Amino acid sequence: MDEKTEIKLRELQLMEQSLQNISLQKQAFQHELNETAKAISELSKAKGDVYNIVGQIMLKTNKEDAEKELKEKTEILELRIKAFDKQEIILKNKVDSVRQEILDRIEKGGKQISKP
């Protein structure tokens, strides 16, 4: 394998690691979004006092403020997930392109070696 192919191979490995990191981060945000949706659902059933955990303390708050805060959090999480989706698509296309380039180089190199 020539030096340029090895460089491309290392580049591909780094891009695949980045893709995996993006996927893990996106999953974490999706999990947080699910938890926020559950909190909104439970909040809608709440009657009486509502509490919000801030750090290590629990603070009494009104239901409307809690709903507003959770809805804002939902919007932010959805935006972040969309951004990760876009990054994931772009990076997947780059990975596919570099992978094909490596395969073409390897195939081309194999044909050159087999010719007398």
Image (cartoon, grey):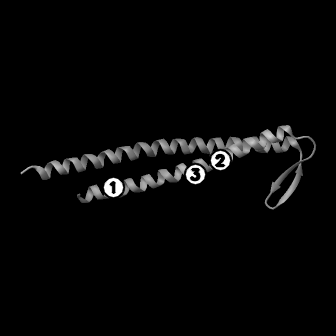
The residue that label 2 is drawn on is 31
Kindly indicate the quadrant of the structure image that contains residue 81: top right
The picture places residue 32, in percent across and down from the top left corner, at 68, 48
Mark positioned earlier in the residue sequence (1 or 2): 1
The residue located at (91%, 40%) in the rendering is: 47
**Which kind of residue does numbered mark 1 sit on?**
Leu
Dividing the picture into quadrants, the one containing residue 1 is bottom left
* x then y, percent, for residue 36: 73, 44
Task: Say whether disc 3 or disc 2 marks the residue closer to the N-terminus.
Answer: 3
| Circle 2: residue type | His
First reached walking from the N terminus: tag 3 or tag 1: 1
Residue at x 38% of width, y 53% of height: 12
**Left-right relation of 101 to 80:** left
Where is mark 1, residue-wise? 9
Picture coordinates of residue 48 (x, y %)?
Answer: 93, 43
Q: Are marks 1 and 2 in contact (CB under 8 Å)?
A: no
Q: Residues within 10 Å of mark 3 (few under 14, many from 20)?
A: some
Residue beneath the point at 14% across and 50% down: 112
Q: Which residue is mark 3?
A: 25
* Secondary structure beneath label 1: helix
Apparent side of residue 32 relative to residue 18 in the rendered image (left or right)? right
Secondary structure beneath dot 2 equals: helix
Give the CA separation, mark 3 to mark 1: 24 Å
Left or right of residue 93: residue 65: right
- Image point (25%, 60%), residue name: 3
Q: Label 3, label 2: how many angstroms apart (C-alpha)? A: 10 Å
Q: Secondary structure beneath disc 3? A: helix
Q: Nearer the viewer, mark 1 or mark 2?
A: 2
